[in-house]
Amino acid sequence: AEHPADIPVINVSPLIDECASRDEIHTAVQAIASACRHVGFFYISHHGVSESLQDRLENASQEFFALPLEEKMDIAMIKSGKAWRGFFPVGGELTSGKPDIKEGIYFSEELDISDQRAVELPLHGANQFPSHPPELKAAVLEYMVAMTNLGHSLLKGIALSLGLSSDFFQANYTSQPTTLFRIFNYPIPDSFNYEGSDQLFGVGEHTDYGLLTILKQDKCGGLQVKLPSGWVQAPVLPGTFVVNLGDMLDRITQGLYRSTPHRVLNTAGRARLSFPFFFDPSWNAIVKPIEGLSKLECYDERSTRWDDADPREYEGEYGAYLTAKVSKVFPDLFATLSE
C-alpha cells in the first residue's frame, strides 16, 4: 500500500546508530519536528527491531487468540488484581464509554513480587502468560525490551527536535518509564451484534494518554487518523512501525506537538491483530509544561476533542492520571478492586 502523503515515513536509524553523522541526525530530527507539529503521527523505518522477533510474536499471538474462550480466560485480567494484566474478551473494554469489538492481552514491565512497586502501586506487578502457546512469553518479554530501547531513542530525537538536550526526557520524565504493551485481536465485526449500536469500531475515536505509542499492525491495517482534512487511512507499510504522540507530550509542549485522534475500523473481512506499545512517563514524574518553548496560539482543546477534556490542564504525577484513565476503560474491574 502507498503511504498517505499526510503521514511521513522517517528513517530513524541515525537516532539508534552511534556512528551516525551530525547531518544524518539533523535530517531525522527535522523530519520528526515537522511530523510532530503538523500531524502527530509518523511511520518509522530502519528501527532495528528484527523481523524474526516480530514473526515469532505474531505467530504465537494468532495461536493464542484461536483458542476457545474458556482457555483464554485462564489468564483473565480479574485474576491479576490491581496489576491489571491479562486477557479481556470482546466487549470487555470501553473506549469513550462504548464497547470495542476487540479482545486482547495486557502486559507491562515484568516485576518480581519482591519489587516494592509491585506491592504498592496499581498497574505494577507480574504479567500473566498463557500455558499455550508456550512461545508467547519469551516473544513478549523480548519485544518489550526492544520497544523500550526504541522508545528512549525516539524521545532523544523528539528532545533534539524541540531544541533540548538529547537526554532531556530521560533526565526529567522517563528515567523509569511506564511501559504498557497490548496485543489486540479484532474479530470480523459481523460475528458480533451489540443491540442499539449504529456503527461499531474495533476501537472508537480516541487519543493516547502518555508520551509515545509505537504500533505494529498486521497486514489487515484498519488504522484511521483524524487530520484537519478529515479521516485518513494509515495502511501497513512493510518494515515500519506507526508512531503517534500521546496527550502528555501534547501537554508538556503546550500543544506545539499534537496528540491526534485515531480509531480502528476492521474492514478486511478477517480477524486483525495489532500490537501497540505505550511508552509513558515514569510513575512519579510530574507532568508540567517544558519552560521556554515557543507556544502556539491558545485555543480551547475541549471544543474539538472526542472526550470534552483538555489534557493540557493536568498537572501532577503521571501515575495518578493514568490510573484514573484506566478505571474508565475497565469500570467493572475497577469497581471490584475498590470495594
Image (tube, rainbow, N blue to C red):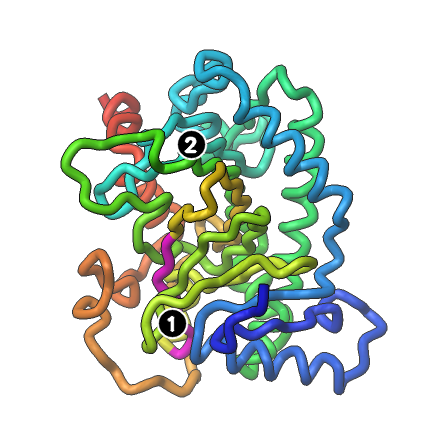
- Residue segment shown in magenta: 256-263
Quarter of the view holding residue 269: top left
Q: Residues within 10 Å of mark 2 (few under 14, many from 20)?
A: many
Look at the image and tell me in which quarter the C terminus lies: top left
Counting from the top left corner in percent of width and height, residue 148 is at 63, 50
Vertically, is 84 above or below 229? above
Q: Which residue is mark 2?
A: 103
| In the displayed structure image, the side of residue 239 where residue 322 appears, left or right | left
- Residue 258 in sight: yes
> Label 1, on which residue?
289
Q: Measured along the vertical axis of the image, is residue 254 above or below residue 279?
A: below
* Position of residue 173 measured from the top left corner of the image (x, y, whole percent): 51, 60
Q: Is residue 44 magenta?
A: no
Place residue 207 in its image quadrant: bottom left
* Amino acid carrying mark 2 in the image: Glu
Q: Main secondary structure of the magenta part?
A: loop
Q: Residue at x 42, y 30 (%)?
A: 84
Percent position of residue 94, x then y:
29, 39
In this view, the residue in front, 289 or 196, is 196
Amino acid carrying mark 1 in the image = Pro
* Most distant residue in the right direction: 19
Query: In which quadrant is the N terminus drawn?
Result: bottom right
